[in-house]
Image: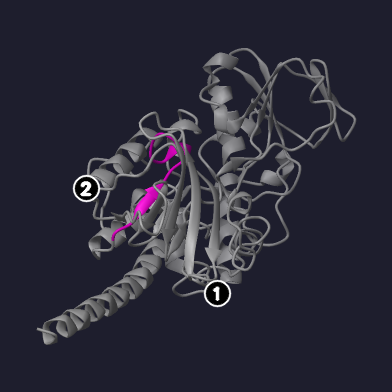
């Protein structure tokens, strides 16, 4: 019998499984980090993953040229540093290799191809009931897991966002979400409309440009563009350093001055800055500033055109809000992702309608009745690691206490049995 699972045919049917520890939903970096921390504390668990691999977002829904936006020391998971020979900004392939090594090192074996249909807290028994459906050829069908603790680690980017645009159905060219975009090689010589100007939109536009496509990037709202490095120092590292000494408003002012010195006036190229500073926008709206890795140079040279919002699509063209008509061959929707938690978690106190914990960082990791969240901080991999450590410590404390109580109860019953002889 597995260390993690106790089957009890007297209490449950054959497709019902009691988990002697938490159920973790999601085998991305967040889920793996929680699993590793629990392993270190001797707490059994299972991880449920709807895809057929760990980190499916990184493996299946990222473009080929992607690298980590932050230096590797800010992206490593708990208790396992990146290899010394990895570059400062590892490629997506190196990061996936790191995650696979991480899972192997901590002996983490998720249940793949198992989609959570619903998770509901049973008030009567004080337990979570997690219903899944498995598409695994070895063990297909529905399963219900019963557990004391539920860790939601599906993250902020579980589902692609597809905005509605008038006339998009009439457009006869290729329409792709950035999650399905791999390389600009297939777009060579094409006129491509990239919808969105976040980090993905900027990088896709740059990649298209490098493959001799002709990208036009839709900028519908204001955006902060910052240099990835200043004088060889990571901007993120610089911010982390300044936060020890300066208030947020002052750091924002310093960032904007440095950005102006390094990148010049980006507003004259159609990239209007928000009225709030980059860190304030991040904290209040959850919008991450764009870290420039070369796209701005292509914008200033005119190789990437910046265009305003979309009014509607037609066959082979698009009309913009300023009345301009663009002839285009393809569309890439760099319109982001969203959480899918509301579609399966039957709970409305801890998570908002958007599938994000209502309580902001750093206290958004713990709900009621053994419910936890990891990877929803809007602070990337470092935020997920912090959550994973907090969650694992909290669960470990409760699990150890319950285990002690069970052992006391068993010992007490054993003593009563002996006294009868």
Which span of residues is magenta-colored? 44-57
Distance, label 2 to label 1, CA atoms, is: 40 Å
Kindly check if marks 2 and 1 are in contact, taking CB atoms under 8 A apart as contact.
Answer: no
In the rendered image, residue 50 lying in the magenta stretch gets the answer yes
In the rendered image, residue 391 lying in the magenta stretch gets the answer no
Please name the residue shown 18% across and 80% down the image. Answer: 411
User: In this figure, which residue is indicated by the disc labeled 1?
Assistant: 247
- Using residue 90 as the reference point, say whether residue 363 is left or right of it: right
Q: Where does the image place residue 235, in percent across and percent down from the top left?
A: 47, 54
The answer to which of marks 2 and 1 sits earlier in the sequence is 2
Viewer-nearest of labels 2 and 1? 2
Colouring chosen for the image of the structure: one colour
Q: Where does the image place residue 46, in percent across and percent down from the top left?
A: 35, 52
Question: Residue 105's mark?
Answer: 2
Q: Is residue 383 above or below residue 178?
A: below
Please name the residue shown 61% across and 62% down the image. Answer: 347
Q: Where does the image place residue 57, in percent across and percent down from the top left?
A: 48, 38
Q: Is residue 266 above or below residue 361?
A: above
Q: Where does the image place residue 82, in percent across and percent down from the top left?
A: 27, 47
In the structure shown, which secondary structural element does the residue marked by tag 2 occupy?
helix
């Amino acid at each position: 019998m597995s260390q993690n699972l106790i089957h009890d045919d007297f209490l449950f049917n054959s497709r019902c499984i009691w988990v002697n520890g938490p159920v973790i939903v999601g085998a991305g970096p967040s889920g793996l980090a929680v699993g590793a921390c629990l392993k270190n504390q001797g707490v059994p668990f299972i991880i449920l993953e709807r895809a057929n691999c760990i980190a499916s977002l990184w493996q299946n829904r990222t473009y080929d040229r992607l690298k980590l936006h932050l230096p590797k020391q800010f992206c490593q998971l708990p208790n396992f540093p990146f290899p010394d020979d990895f570059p400062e900004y590892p490629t997506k392939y190196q990061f996936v290799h790191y995650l696979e090594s991480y899972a192997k090192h901590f002996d983490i074996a998720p249940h793949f191809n198992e989609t959570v249909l619903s998770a509901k807290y049973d008030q009567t028994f004080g337990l979570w009931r997690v219903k899944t459906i498995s598409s695994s050829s070895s063990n297909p069908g529905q399963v219900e897991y019963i557990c004391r603790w539920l860790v939601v680690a599906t993250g902020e980017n579980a589902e692609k966002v597809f905005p509605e645009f008038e006339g998009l159905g009439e457009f006869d060219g290729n329409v792709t979400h950035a999650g399905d975009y791999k390389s600009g090689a297939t777009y060579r010589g094409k006129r491509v409309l990239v919808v969105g100007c976040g980090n993905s939109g900027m990088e896709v536009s740059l990649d298209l440009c490098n493959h001799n496509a002709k990208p036009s990037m839709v900028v519908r709202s204001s955006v902060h563009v910052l240099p990835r490095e200043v004088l060889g120092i990571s901007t993120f590292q610089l911010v982390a350093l300044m936060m020890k000494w300066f208030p947020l408003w002052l750091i924002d002012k310093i960032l904007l001055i440095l950005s102006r010195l390094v990148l010049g006036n980006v507003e004259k190229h159609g990239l209007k800055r928000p009225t709030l500073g980059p860190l304030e926008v991040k904290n209040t709206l959850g919008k991450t500033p764009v870290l420039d890795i070369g796209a701005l140079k292509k914008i200033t040279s005119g190789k990437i055109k910046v265009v305003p919002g979309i009014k509607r699509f037609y066959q082979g063209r698009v009309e913009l809000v300023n009345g301009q008509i663009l002839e285009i061959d393809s569309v890439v929707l760099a319109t982001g992702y969203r959480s899918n938690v509301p579609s399966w978690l039957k709970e409305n106190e801890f998570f908002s309608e958007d599938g994000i914990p209502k309580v902001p960082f750093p206290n958004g990791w713990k709900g009621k009745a053994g419910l936890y969240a990891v990877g929803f901080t809007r602070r990337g991999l470092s935020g997920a690691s912090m959550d994973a450590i907090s969650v694992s410590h909290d669960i470990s404390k409760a699990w150890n206490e319950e285990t002690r109580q069970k052992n006391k109860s068993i010992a007490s019953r054993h003593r009563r049995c002996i006294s009868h002889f």
